[in-house]
Image: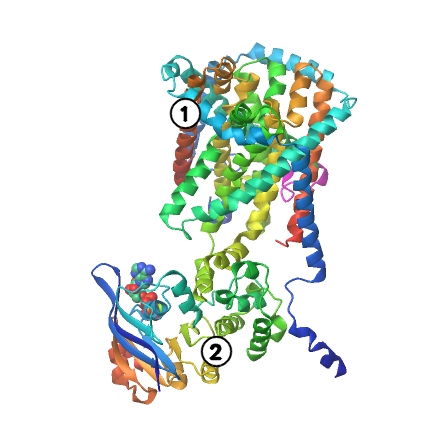
């Protein structure tokens, strides 16, 4: 399989001399869901947000289908971001816009600001949005304001917004951490199936190891800003988990 | 007084209830304020019999105000229409200019090279009372409504610009981040990420500013910048206090009407 | 069955607003556009004057330079102190009247429609009349001088403080009051122990805000003879002594800046 995203020697320090990411090398292929696990503060969010440059890297390269992401700016950066879907832990929907408008936000990179302001989107975008609403089971909610939805519904809208971009990779930063166990499973199912159906890789930061084992095709374990495990879920042993999270009392 | 106090309350003996926790500080403060008031009143040449004479004067003054006289109603009407026009134009152009200035000045959206000039403009617009600005504009463009409009545009930028800037700085950056992450151009980030979060407050500021401009247009009229203020000032100088009262009653009525109208506008935008 | 089939293609189009919402919005935009157009036409801007304005302003600026600094200790300083006293005394006076009025205006404390309406009318009247107009009135009553200014400032502030304070009182969480009532507290102690602690921060911040505004406003009251900096400025303008006007403008600017710093400082400490 071809490599879609290739990260090499990536480092990041927020404060000079205090690196958070200490040289990350990771390749992501065309298909499959990758779960990144690691204890709080190891830099999982930092890593995933550097990919679409919500955070700037300090050093290293991020090659996305032949495009070097780490140094682009302005229009090139925006055009790259259009191709990368992002799902957030706290959904980050625009609360006062309707569900439909939130979905159409995913097309803003392709529509002129003037047309966006007048809500003039191409009919195929609207049709796509209506389809996605069906997929996420919120067909009747198009006109509801985002702040009237439940957490699970919001996250579904968040995923649909990312899918509206017709992304070539889907990133998700702890998409289930604010949700109950049942809803978490449903969200993971949605992410997994959408990745498969659209033939794109999905990268998910996740705290729930069981959930990761259940849905991931590959697990990346991070500790102290480094990758310490990278392999299929069935190879992830308790020893690895001790290495990743430290200590062992919590394992029982 | 904190919540537990509510529980303890019935046990406090009647007559010695203190509304403050550290009453001696408050007493000291009250004493200082009283001392200052006496001192300042002395500075302002305030004396008791001057006050009494004033009250006498006031009674005569009031009796000459009643009943209000509407016999110069045509003057009242033209003055008022002009005041409203001044207010409408000043609010429209003031808000129009405030929007970009506020966005440029918001520190969570813009780098320092953009924020500080924008903030300087807003501070300068706020620093001077519209009357002073009106005097300056009268020197520049002559007596009349244009000077009033310009002066109130400046005041509107100072007010709406500042509040709108603060409103933008209080928005949730998470929503902005999500819109940015889709690759949206800056203007779309503004219309989809920023505006929905502040539009309700913006409508509030605008209706408030229209109201304020209407009131202030009476004020700039006094120094010669058009509108009902000119008629009011002239009535004072001619001692036509009954006409003064008629004008004042009309001002109050219009301001009240304006308040109803602004509530209605808010409902249209359902905020 | 046939119904749902008929509806299916309908749902493929998405519209942001219902027809009614659309019409209301269009109507509103139309009203705004028409109001602006009409005002622009009738205010008859003399464009040559407008384009000439920058030139005129530059000219004024040149005549203001250099400011006649020697004028400050001679006259401006005394006027500045007078302005300060007018603003501060006016704010203090307004507090005395605004407190009871705000209590009467708050419908949760005063459950009497008539009294609410009375208080609200008083507050609206106070707010609708500009401080400069109040100053004109009180100059007629008390004669020219700072006393008229201080009373004018007070009358204008009552409405402002009373309205905001009344709203703060109405927002007081009902549960806290309920607890006091359950404990058998009288109306007075409900106010002292329930409402006052809840609105105290708001009260001080409102007073500070108003004091800040009053400092600015009292600097222009002199234009109609009510004392303070405005009086000196009027004299300087009437005699075309622009370099003295410059000193006064600089003084006002400095006062505004200092006022802002003081207010920020107290707001941090008090609230
Ligand atoms: N904007 C920032 N400025 C400075 N330091 C930051 C910033 N964001 C994150 N950090 C630091 O970087 C480190 C990694 O943070 P990050 O959010 O990437 O961790 P994480 O692995 O996602 O943790 P969690 O599982 O709790 O979400 C932390 O020590 C954090 O304090
Ligand atoms: Mg994180």
Any part of residue C166 in sight = no
Q: Nearer the viewer, residue C119 or C75?
A: C75
Q: Is A193 covered by the magenta stretch?
A: no
Instruction: Give the residue at mark 2.
Output: A187
Q: Nearer the viewer, residue A158 or A249?
A: A158
Q: Which mark is residue B128?
A: none
Quadrant assignment, res C84: top left
Instruction: Give the residue at mark 1.
Output: C250
Residue C192 at x, y = what percent? 53, 39
State the separation of the CA atoms marked 1 and 2. 63 Å
Q: Nearer the viewer, mark 1 or mark 2?
A: 1
Residue A131 at x, y = what percent? 58, 77
Name above or below for residue A166 compared with residue A92: below
Quadrant assignment, res A122: bottom right
Residue C238 at x, y = what percent? 52, 14
Which region is colored magenta?
A: C104-116
Quadrant assignment, res C18: bottom right
């Amino acid at each position: 399989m071809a490599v879609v995203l290739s990260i090499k020697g990536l480092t990041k320090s927020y404060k000079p001399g205090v690196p958070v990411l200490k040289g990350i090398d990771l390749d992501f292929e065309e298909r499959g869901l990758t779960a990144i696990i690691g204890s709080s503060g190891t830099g999982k969010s930092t890593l995933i947000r550097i990919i679409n440059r919500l955070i700037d890297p300090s050093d290293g390269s991020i090659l996305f289908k032949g495009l070097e992401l780490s140094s682009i700016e302005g229009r090139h950066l925006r055009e790259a971001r259009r191709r990368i879907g992002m799902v957030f832990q706290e959904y980050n929907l625009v609360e006062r816009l309707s569900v439909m408008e939130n979905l159409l936000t995913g097309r803003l990179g392709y529509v002129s600001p003037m047309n966006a302001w007048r809500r003039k989107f191409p009919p195929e975008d609207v049709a796509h949005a209506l389809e996605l609403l069906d997929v996420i089971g919120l067909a009747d909610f198009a006109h509801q304001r985002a702040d009237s939805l439940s957490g699970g519904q919001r996250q579904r809208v968040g995923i649909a917004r990312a899918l509206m971009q017709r992304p070539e990779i889907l990133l998700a930063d702890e998409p289930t951490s604010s949700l109950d166990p049942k809803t978490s499973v449903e969200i993971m199912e949605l992410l997994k199936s959408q990745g498969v159906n659209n033939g794109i890789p999905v990268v998910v930061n996740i705290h729930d190891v069981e959930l990761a084992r259940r849905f991931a095709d590959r697990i990346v374990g991070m500790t102290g800003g480094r990758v310490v495990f990278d392999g299929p879920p069935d190879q992830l042993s308790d020893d690895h988990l001790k290495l990743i999270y430290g200590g062992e009392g919590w394992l029982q | 007084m904190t919540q537990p106090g509510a529980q303890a309350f019935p046990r406090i003996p009647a007559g010695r209830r203190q509304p403050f926790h550290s009453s001696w500080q408050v007493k000291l403060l009250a004493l200082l304020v009283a001392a200052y008031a006496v001192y300042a009143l002395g500075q302002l040449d305030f004396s008791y019999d001057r006050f009494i004479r004033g009250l006498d004067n006031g009674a005569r003054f009031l009796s000459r105000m009643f009943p209000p006289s509407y016999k110069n109603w045509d003057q009242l009407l033209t003055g008022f229409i002009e005041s409203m026009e001044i207010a409408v134009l000043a609010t429209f152009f003031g808000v129009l200019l405030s929007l970009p200035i506020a966005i440029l000045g918001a520190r969570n959206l813009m780098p320092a090279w953009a924020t500080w000039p924008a903030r300087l403009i807003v501070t300068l617009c706020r620093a001077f009372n519209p009357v002073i600005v009106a005097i300056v504009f009268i020197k520049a463009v002559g007596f009349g409504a244009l000077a009033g409009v310009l002066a109130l545009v400046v005041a509107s930028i100072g007010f709406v610009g500042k509040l709108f800037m603060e409103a933008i700085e209080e928005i949730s950056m998470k929503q902005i981040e999500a819109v940015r992450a889709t690759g949206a151009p800056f203007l779309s980030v503004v219309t989809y990420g920023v505006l929905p979060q502040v539009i309700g407050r913006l409508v509030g500021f605008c209706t408030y500013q229209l109201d304020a401009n209407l009131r202030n247009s009476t004020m700039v009229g006094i120094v010669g910048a058009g509108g009902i203020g000119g008629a009011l000032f002239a009535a004072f100088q001619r001692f036509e206090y009954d006409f003064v009262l008629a004008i004042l009653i009309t001002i109050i009525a219009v301001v009240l009407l304006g308040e109803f109208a602004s509530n209605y506008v808010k409902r249209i935008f359902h905020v | 069955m046939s119904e749902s089939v008929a509806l299916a293609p309908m749902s493929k189009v998405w519209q942001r607003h219902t027809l009614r919402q659309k019409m209301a919005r269009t109507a509103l935009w139309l009203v705004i556009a028409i109001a602006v157009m009409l005002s622009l036409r009738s205010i008859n801007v003399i464009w040559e004057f407008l384009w000439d304005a920058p030139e005129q302003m530059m000219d004024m600026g040149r005549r203001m330079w250099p400011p006649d600094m020697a004028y400050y200790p001679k006259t401006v300083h005394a006027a500045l102190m007078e302005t300060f006293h007018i603003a501060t005394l006016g704010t203090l006076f307004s507090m005395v009247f605004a407190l009871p009025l705000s209590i009467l205006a708050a419908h949760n404390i005063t459950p009497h429609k008539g009294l609410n309406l009375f208080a609200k009318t008083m507050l609206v009247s106070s707010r609708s009349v500009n401080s400069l107009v109040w100053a004109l009135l009180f100059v007629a009553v008390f004669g020219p001088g700072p006393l008229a200014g201080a009373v004018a400032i007070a009358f204008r502030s009552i409405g402002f403080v009373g309205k905001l304070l009344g709203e703060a009182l109405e927002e007081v969480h009902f549960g806290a009051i309920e607890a006091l009532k359950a404990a058998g507290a009288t109306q007075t102690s409900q106010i002292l122990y329930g409402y006052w602690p809840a609105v105290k921060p708001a009260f001080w911040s409102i007073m500070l805000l108003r004091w800040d505004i009053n400092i600015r406003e009292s600097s222009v009251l002199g234009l109609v003879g009510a004392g303070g900096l405005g009086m000196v400025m009027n004299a300087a303008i009437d005699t075309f002594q622009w370099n003295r006007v410059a000193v006064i403008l600089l003084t006002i600017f400095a006062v505004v800046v200092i006022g802002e710093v003081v207010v920020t400082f107290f707001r941090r400490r008090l609230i």
